Image: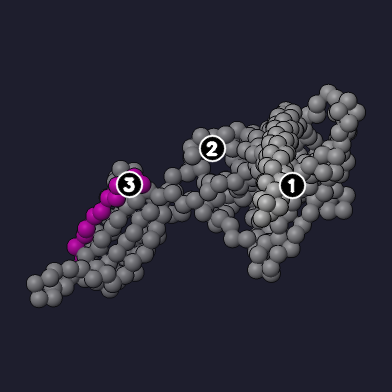
Amino acid sequence: MELYFEKLKEYNETKKVIDTKIKEQKEVLNKLKEASRKNEERIREYVGKNLIFGEYEIGSYFDQERKVQMYYPVLHMDSTIVGGITNVLFKCTDNYAEEESTEEIIQQYELKSEERNINITITAISNAYTLGYSDHDVLLEIKDNFVMDNKVKYKVIINGKEEYTYERDFGGKIINKILKKRLKDKHISYSNFDKESQRMRSKRLRKTGRRGRMCKNVLLRARPNWNENIYIFIYNNIVTNLNPKFNSEKVIADITKNYRRCSKEDQITRLYHISGDEILFIALNEIDEYNNCYAYEDEKLILEIPYPDKRFRIDVYICTYQQIEYIESYTQTYHDTFYIVEKADIDLNKKLNILDILKELKIKQ
């Protein structure tokens, strides 16, 4: 029994020594892990601050295979680092048949720092944004020109081991700078929005399968004769069939007098007795039709802008009075719509700077 207690005592003392050493080693290991974490943070901060999120210039590259021009940010390197971009790719990824293909620009950097004995590789990937601008009012596109802009993902590998990822949002600034330079002396006139541009636009939309605005260049020179159209409507539907003495001139005079008083928020309505239980109901509204535009297109440029005019909508209803029990109402029997187009006072041949057109449209947003 004494031997047992001696062995137990010896075991406990040995275990105590071992536990103490394990604890010490754990503390050393934790310190090493903390030192490694801080070192990793320092490297990440150094790479991010000095490389990824530093200053940049705009570079460009022409892809001979696909015949496209690419623009991208070129990162400024630390003075102790040598090297730069070794490759730029324009990659098209085909998805499922019902989806559009995805186009990407990929940059690859190879960098070295002899002072720090560091080898760095950087891969930058972003969507290939079309060089241009678009919103619900305007479309501008420089054909076969793509830009690495907005969110760019950077993958950084140091000495083939440490790997870091970053994401930088350039916020469209690169596109804006390039457009400002490319379009500085680019002018256009309304007379350039011709039938040939319309044909090219129709061909483009058929080829790409995109749904676009309703661009009718012919309306730039044509003014809808709303007076005559309403007179014909009244003659065919009222004078001929309901009341040969109906005063169509009074209706047209009232519209002429009142349509400028309506707005996009306030509608103007008028009622005219036809005969018996029939009335003519007129509603006037000022409208925005964002789908309506003029289109210009050549081999290098696409431009779609809104009509430079005011548009008023005239809804014309012929209604019949009816009474069902205690409810009185009018039932619509015929309806048609006409438009008054008041064109801006423009010179069709005046040369307009495209950048100024964009600036003006952006201000109206």
x and y percentages locating residue 298 in the rendered image: 72, 49
Secondary element type, mark 2: helix
Q: Is residue 184 magenta?
A: no
What residue is shown at x 86% (from left), y 28% (from top)?
116
Q: Which residue is mark 2?
A: 362
Circle on res. 187: none
| Picture quadrant of residue 122 | top right
Q: Closest to the observer: 146 or 32?
A: 32
Q: Closest to the observer: 17 or 326?
A: 17
| Picture quadrant of residue 257 | top left
Q: Magenta segment range?
A: 263-274
Label 2 and label 1: CA atoms lie apart by 29 Å
Residue 277 versus residue 33 in the image, above or below: below
Residue type beneath disc 1: Ile
What residue is shown at x 28% (from left), y 72% (from top)?
333
Query: Are the residues flagged by discs 2 and 1 in contact, CB closer than 8 Å?
Result: no
Q: Residues within 10 Å of mark 1 (few under 14, many from 20)?
A: many
Q: Residues within 10 Å of mark 3 (few under 14, many from 20)?
A: few
Q: Which residue is mark 1?
A: 125
x and y percentages locating residue 269 in the rendered image: 25, 53
Label 2 and label 3: CA atoms lie apart by 22 Å
The answer to whether residue 251 is visible is yes
Q: Which residue is mark 3?
A: 265
Q: Is residue 269 magenta?
A: yes
Residue 88 versus residue 326 in the image, above or below: above
Q: Residues within 10 Å of mark 2 (few under 14, many from 20)?
A: few
Q: Closest to the observer: 151 or 115?
A: 115
Secondary element type, mark 3: loop
Q: Earlier in the sequence, mark 1 or mark 3?
A: 1
Can you tell which of label 2 and label 1 is closer to the viewer? 1
Q: Earlier in the sequence, mark 2 or mark 3?
A: 3
